[in-house]
Image (cartoon, helix red, strand yellow):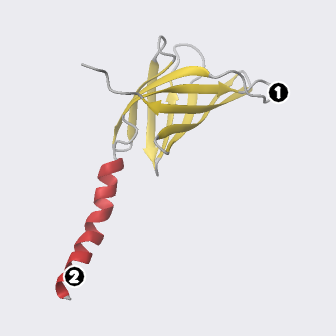
Amino acid sequence: MKTITAIALVLAVLAPAAATAQTSAAFTGTWEGTYTLNGPDGTPGAPRPIVFDLTQKGKELTGTAGPADQQEKVVGTVADGKATFDILMPQGPPFKFSLTIVKGRLQGDMTRENNGTVRQAKVDAAKAAPAKK
């Protein structure tokens, strides 16, 4: 009985550490998908392509994002399973993202405020397949 109790205690102590290790870099990688920008009246527009090339180190999130031919710098954080970051634009205000991983997909919202107008979009992306050698 003492052996079972000792094993249960060790598993209880190690399980949270293992879960953290598995998710500590969950956002790292290349994600390809779309964002669907709402029009001024709130109706969704046509999906547009977006690529995220993210690196998560602890709570810090860096990388690039945008259309494949127009990648810009990403600066943000990860907390409680949610990535919150900005795409810094050479001109104009940043695009702001709040994304989580849902069933293996990067999903959430993008907003951008420009001259008092707030635009919103839904984001959905899948992890890109590794490049073939």
Q: Amino acid at mark 1?
A: Asp
Q: Amino acid at mark 2?
A: Ile
Q: Position of residue 17 (x, y in %)?
A: 29, 59
Relative to 3, is 115 above or below? above
How many neighbours does mark 1 have within 10 angstroms: few (below 14), some (14-19), or many (20 or more)? few
Is label 1 in a helix, a strand or a loop? loop
Q: Residue at x 76, y 24 (%)?
A: 39
Taking depth in this image into account, of 68 and 4 the one nearest to the observer is 4
Residue in view at x 30 percent, y 71 percent: 12
Front label number (1 vs 2) = 2
Residue corresponding to mark 1: 41
Q: Quick check: 123 left or right of 74?
A: right
Instruction: Tell whether label 2 touches label 1 (CB within 8 Å).
Output: no
Quote the CA–CA distance across marks 1 and 2: 62 Å
Q: Residues within 10 Å of mark 2 (few under 14, many from 20)?
A: few
Quadrant of the image occupied by residue 60: top left
Location of residue 52 in the rendering, given as x and y in whole percent from the top left corner: 45, 26
Q: Quadrant of the C terminus?
A: top left
Residue wearing tag 2: 4
